[in-house]
Image (spheres, helix red, strand yellow):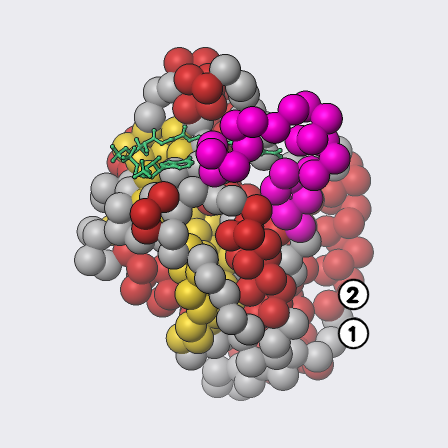
Amino acid sequence: MAYENILTEIHERVGLVTINRPKALNALNSQTMQEIYDALSAYDANDSIGAMVLTGSEKAFAAGADIKEMMDASAVEMVRRDFIGALYDSIMAINKPVIAAVSGFALGGGCELAMACDMIIASESAVFGQPEINLGVIPGAGGTQRLVRAVGKALAMEVVLNDRRLTAEEAYQFGLVNRVYSTEAYLNEALRIANEIAARAPIAVRLAKEMVNKSFEVSLREGLAQERRNFYFLFSTEDQSEGMQAFAEKRPADWKGH
Ligand code: DAK
């Protein structure tokens, strides 16, 4: 498919999506969000792909939702058009793991997009923030919810109320990002980690992702019950037999994805 604002490329078993609106620091307009979702969905449906990496440029992962696109909208128009809202929700429905490889600005909707991914690998120049307060609004795609769960209330309040920006190192210390690498290395490292995950048992990976994300949404009792049901279910897959047999025979497992 021909995209205007993103680039796509396959690295072994990983689908890479690169946001590419350099003149607007990768600001997320409706078209860009649609393209990101379309590309991730296509990889999700492709059996030769096991995981995805979403990245931007060295200077900007994404500097937020496109302010110029929404600045003149009325509340009614925002609701009617559902400006990028449904697209953020749809990204949660992607089944395979998505790693955000973040360098430079990850602000507002950009930070929210990274947080909607399953892991964040950052370059040392990454800056995370929710500066919507400067525009007279609040985060609209998870900034008041996911950030609290990641870094706790105290820091999230500073970020959301007073535009505190987090460096990559701070984001790492507070648990927002998984790892920090140099600007030369972060993308390759994200691809490497994604390829490692993509080489694992696909159904188990899918259910593992689903259950970790589920922990944010259901009670502990319900989450534990669902986890156990999925654990039992995996004993109906060939990959479970293969994985345990391979362990007993001291050889690498040959995953089939069923
Ligand atoms: N939108 C549109 N254009 C942007 C942009 C943005 N978010 N960020 C940067 N640009 C554009 C600039 O306007 C400039 O364009 P030209 O003037 O050259 O045409 C170009 O990118 C380069 O930017 P600067 O000249 O400003 O570059 P600097 O290096 O000086 O500064 C900066 C970089 C990132 C600090 C600065 O550009 C900046 O503060 N940008 C805005 C950051 C921001 O406020 N982000 C939050 C946006 S609000 C929703 C869910 C979520 C959201 C909305 C709705 N629904 C569910 C409905 C999310 C909202 C947001 O993210």
Which residue position is annotated with label 1?
236
Residue 201 at x, y = what percent?
Answer: 59, 73
* Residue 177 inside the magenta-drawn segment: no
The C terminus is located in which quarter? bottom right
Q: Is residue 193 visible?
A: no
The residue positioned 69% from the left and 38% from the top of the image is 82
At mark 2, the secondary structure is helix
Q: Say which quarter of the image contains residue 124.
A: top left
Marks 1 and 2 close (CB-CB < 8 Å): yes
> Identity of the amino acid at label 1?
Ser
Viewer-closest of 152 and 108 = 108
Q: Which mark identifies residue 233?
A: 2
Q: Classify 143 as above or below 200.
A: above
How many residues crowd mark 2 within 10 Å: few (<14), some (14–19), many (20+)? few
What are the residue bounds of the magenta stretch?
66-90
The residue positioned 42% from the left and 55% from the top of the image is 19
Label 1 CB less than 8 angstroms from ligand 1:
no
Residue 146 at x, y = what percent?
Answer: 55, 33
Q: Classify 11 as above or below 61.
A: below
Viewer-closest of 52 and 195 = 52
The residue positioned 56% from the left and 27% from the top of the image is 72
Label 2 CB less than 8 angstroms from ligand 1:
no
Query: Total of numbered circles in the picture?
Result: 2
> Identity of the amino acid at label 2?
Phe
The residue positioned 26% from the left and 51% from the top of the image is 58
Viewer-closest of 2 and 152 = 2
How much space separates mark 1 and mark 2, taking CA atoms? 6 Å
Viewer-closest of 60 and 117 = 60
Residue 224 at x, y = what percent?
Answer: 73, 44
The N terminus is located in which quarter? bottom right
